[in-house]
Image: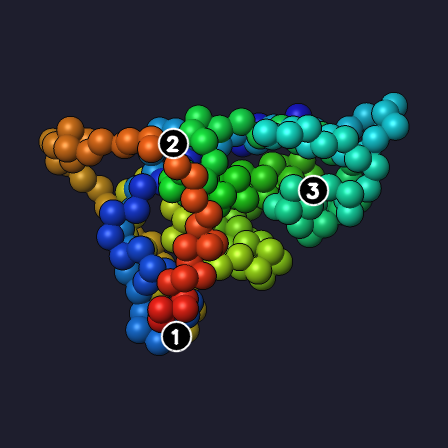
């Protein structure tokens, strides 16, 4: 069994400029940081003694016999792409609720890809992990999301992320002195409103306004 621990993130500046519809024309810049709240994914290869081939546990429990029967879209797409020949049991736990605006969907994608690669003893760097998560969400799932969340969740820390017109991105770590970190943390409050929102829907409206 492997367990991945992926941080959620807070975006300070530049949200929206991380979407290719914007930065391919104008470039983009984002400042964000990971927080000490996490998405946990545990995964193991299922022993051959069960009638089912996949057991997926999140807010629901799925017990199915084929990949195509999996209802969770991210899990289904990730298994098809990264481990189509494995029979798996996957559990998700999070410190914060899904769809609460802290990059939870990208943290899930990053953690899941990391877990599936680790199960197969495949090494992957944080930058590669970010790129794979971007590809999974943008290309495989056709989600209307930007690039910053996957990068922030995969790399962790406090980052300045720059996006170029050539669809390339680079990250510069921001190393704040302890005094500045303390002052910043004392002035930030994270409030849970109880309202869920779908980032892809929000981004869809943003793309409409851009066009």
**Quadrant including the C terminus:** bottom left
Residue 75 spot, x, y in % from top left: 65, 42
Q: Which residue is mark 1?
A: 211
Mark 3 touches mark 1? (CB < 8 Å): no
State whether residue 161 is above or below residue 166: above
The answer to whether any part of residue 127 appears in the image is no
Position of residue 51 in the picture relative to residue 124 (left or right) = right
Looking at the image, which residue is at 81% across and 25% down? 47
Frontmost of labels 1 and 2 is 2
Residue 70 spot, x, y in % from top left: 73, 41
Residue 34 vs residue 196, the one in the foreground: 196
Mark 3, residues whose alpha carbon is within 10 Å: few (<14), some, or many (≥20)?
Answer: few
Q: Which mark is residue 180?
A: none
Q: Secondary structure at mark 1?
A: loop
Q: Earlier in the sequence, mark 3 or mark 1?
A: 3
Position of residue 25 in the picture relative to residue 119 (left or right) = left
Q: Which mark is residue 194?
A: 2
**Quadrant including the N terminus:** top right
Q: Which mark is residue 71?
A: 3
Q: Earlier in the sequence, mark 1 or mark 2?
A: 2
Mark 1, residues whose alpha carbon is within 10 Å: few (<14), some, or many (≥20)?
Answer: few
């Amino acid at each position: 069994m492997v367990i991945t621990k992926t941080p959620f993130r807070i975006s300070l500046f530049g949200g929206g400029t991380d979407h290719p519809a914007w930065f391919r024309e104008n470039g983009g810049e984002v400042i964000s940081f990971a927080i000490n709240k996490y998405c946990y994914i545990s995964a193991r290869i299922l022993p051959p003694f069960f009638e089912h081939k996949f057991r997926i546990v999140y807010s629901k429990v799925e017990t199915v016999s084929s990949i195509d029967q999996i209802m969770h879209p991210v899990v289904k797409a990730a298994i098809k792409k990264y481990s189509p020949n494995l029979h798996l049991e996957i559990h998700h736990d999070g410190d914060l609720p899904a769809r609460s605006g802290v990059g939870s969907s990208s943290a899930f994608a990053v953690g899941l890809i990391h877990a599936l690669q680790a199960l197969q003893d495949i090494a992957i760097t944080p930058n590669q992990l970010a790129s794979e998560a971007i590809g999974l969400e943008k290309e495989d799932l056709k989600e209307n999301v930007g690039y910053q969340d996957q990068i922030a969740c995969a790399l962790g820390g406090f980052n300045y992320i720059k996006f170029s017109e050539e669809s390339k991105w680079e990250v510069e770590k921001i190393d704040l002195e302890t005094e500045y970190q303390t002052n910043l943390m004392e002035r930030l409050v994270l409030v849970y409103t109880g309202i869920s929102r779908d980032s892809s829907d929000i981004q869809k409206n943003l793309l409409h306004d851009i066009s």
